[in-house]
Amino acid sequence: MLVRSVLFNIVLYLNFTVLAIVFSPIIVLPQRWGWPVVRLWARSSLWWHRLICGSKEEVTGLEHRPEGGYIVACKHQSAWEAFRLVTIVDKPAFIVKRELMWLPLFGWYMARFGQIPVNRGKRSAALTAMTEHARRAIANGQQVIIFPEGTRRPPGIEPRYRYGIVHMYKELGVPCLPIALNSGLYWPRRSMIHTPGTVQVEILPPIEPGLAGGEFAERLQREIESASDRLIEEALDRDPGVSRILNRPNLT
């Protein structure tokens, strides 16, 4: 697994670099010309992951996606979902830490395609700025993707949802699409080792606007966490090798 994982990480960066250079003219062209290239990058990255690391995927609930602009609240365990979300929604606008926008090539593409930077050092000001950026993205027909816990968290640990998603839901008045997954079992955070198996993603029914903040927060966390926990248990039955990620004994 180590050799395959190292090879994939090399190919992943080479794949982006080659595509970013070859298609660099899209940075100055209308956005609609560039979205197919963005999806090509995401799909090719996942294709290499399947080829080299032996990963598969199972995505359910695609029929739950609303039309137009809306909020996507996704469980965040791995870099894997960042690629897959690009192909799940039409025009993604990720909430990202602003330092990513400073990266050569990658940051330029993020800025060109309306990704939303957040200065984590300025709490209230950052929340206001994030919401205004998100409002413009929604008006542009984009889907605003936010990871409610703010960063990748290992599968199976206690969740830590932040207030940003609640504030955005209350202010924007659009549906929120919850997404559960178990990707951290196969592409763990802060690890070079990728485990072969089937990543599961479950797109849950949207939460319509109009709920009180507390009610929305409780429902969102309950629905995402219960579904993600179930997907983890299914993965343990199907791919016993991932038990090492949860520090559970492999009983097979």
Image: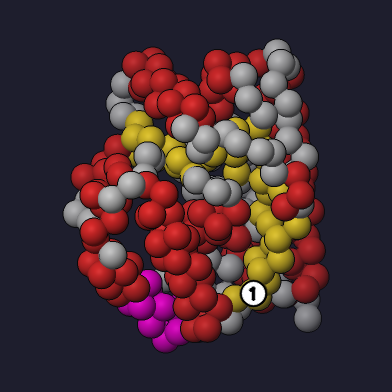
**Percent position (x, y) of residue 137?**
45, 31
Give the residues in magenta.
1-12
**Percent position (x, y) of residue 52?**
49, 83
> Looking at the image, which residue is at 73% across and 26% down?
208
Determine whether the residue tagged by mark 1 lies in a helix, strand or loop. Answer: strand
Give the amino acid at mark 1.
Lys
Residue under label 1: 56
Question: Image quadrant of residue 97?
Answer: top left
Q: Eyeballing the image, is 111 above or below 172?
A: below
Q: Eyeballing the image, is 141 above or below 108?
A: above
Question: Image quadrant of residue 19?
Answer: bottom left
Q: Eyeballing the image, is 109 above or below 166?
A: below
**Percent position (x, y) of residue 173?**
62, 19
- Image side of residue 226 versus residue 118, left or right: right
> Looking at the image, which residue is at 55% across and 78% down?
50
**Percent position (x, y) of residue 56?**
64, 74
Q: Name the quarter where the C terminus is drawn.
A: bottom right
Magenta-span inclusion, residue 9: yes
